[in-house]
Image: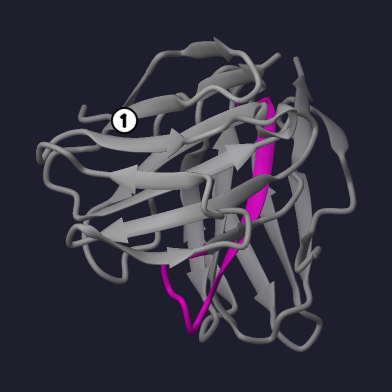
Amino acid sequence: DQQVKQNSPSLSVQEGRISILNCDYTNSMFDYFLWYKKYPAEGPTFLISISSIKDKNEDGRFTVFLNKSAKHLSLHIVPSQPGDSAVYFCAARGSGGYQKVTFGTGTKLQVIP
Amino acid sequence: EPEVTQTPSHQVTQMGQEVILRCVPISNHLYFYWYRQILGQKVEFLVSFYNNEISEKSEIFDDQFSVERPDGSNFTLKIRSTKLEDSAMYFCASSERVGVTEAFFGQGTRLTVV
């Protein structure tokens, strides 16, 4: 069951450049999408979200884009900072059971100083 | 800053034994969750809890699992008879109100079944 897929297990970016993390989903019933960041030995931390009725949401250096027709979303971080180095999880919530969140497998981002 | 706290941070148990993982959610939150992450795999939803009852559970959450909010502050996950494949990081989370999906996670309990 891979309803939420992050096909890149890792990504390296130079400090100051843009980081783009991608996520694909298969379930058209998802109506809300989230990105979580996770450091080693810590729980996931909520980063940013987007409703399925929108195509973009921005919060400071973080922007999430949603392409519903392609069932694709992406997280842009600009400029990238060394402290952004972490595992980033894409997650989605179904419109039926609205408390269950389905996570992707994660992308490990390394920002190189 | 309020946070979700989990104890213990690491639990080692023998196969077949019962374990209880404990969590203190953020005090004004109404929804509580357990997730788990097997090493190298994705974070998986186990159960959500609201108004003193399970509101949703996954296929992973079988009869070996139970949750309880015994005293209005703690939220526990019990595994009755642990199996080797229960070894994972277990995360407790809470969210403020109905419809709020942005849950706050604890640091996790690493459960090792030997």
A40 left or right of B71? right
**In the image, is residue B42 above or below residue B51?**
above
Q: Nearer the viewer, residue B94 or A83?
A: B94
Query: Which residue lies at the image location 14% right of the left edge and 35% below the top edge?
Result: B73
Question: Is any part of residue A80 visible from this angle?
Answer: no
Q: Residue B106: horizontal and vertical position, in percent?
A: 40, 30
Decide if residue A93 is on the left or right side of residue B34: right
> What element does badge 1 sit on?
strand
- In the image, is residue A92 part of the stretch drawn in magenta? yes
**Quadrant of the snapshot with the N terminus of chain A:** bottom right
Q: Residue B66: where, in percent of width, then height?
A: 40, 46
Q: Which residue is mark 1?
A: B23
Residue at 62 percent of width and 14 percent of height: B14
Q: Is residue B35 visible?
A: yes
Where are the magenta residues, as a range?
Answer: A84-100
Side (left or right) of B6 relative to A81: left
- Give the image quarter of residue A14: top right
B52 or A69, which lies in front?
A: B52
Identity of the residue drawn at 57% across and 17% down: A41
Circle count: 1
Q: Where the C terminus of chain A falls, by quadrant? A: top right
Judge left or right: residue B56 versus residue A66.
left
The amino acid on which the numbered mark 1 sits, given as a three-letter code, is Cys
Residue A100 in percent (x, y) is at 49, 64
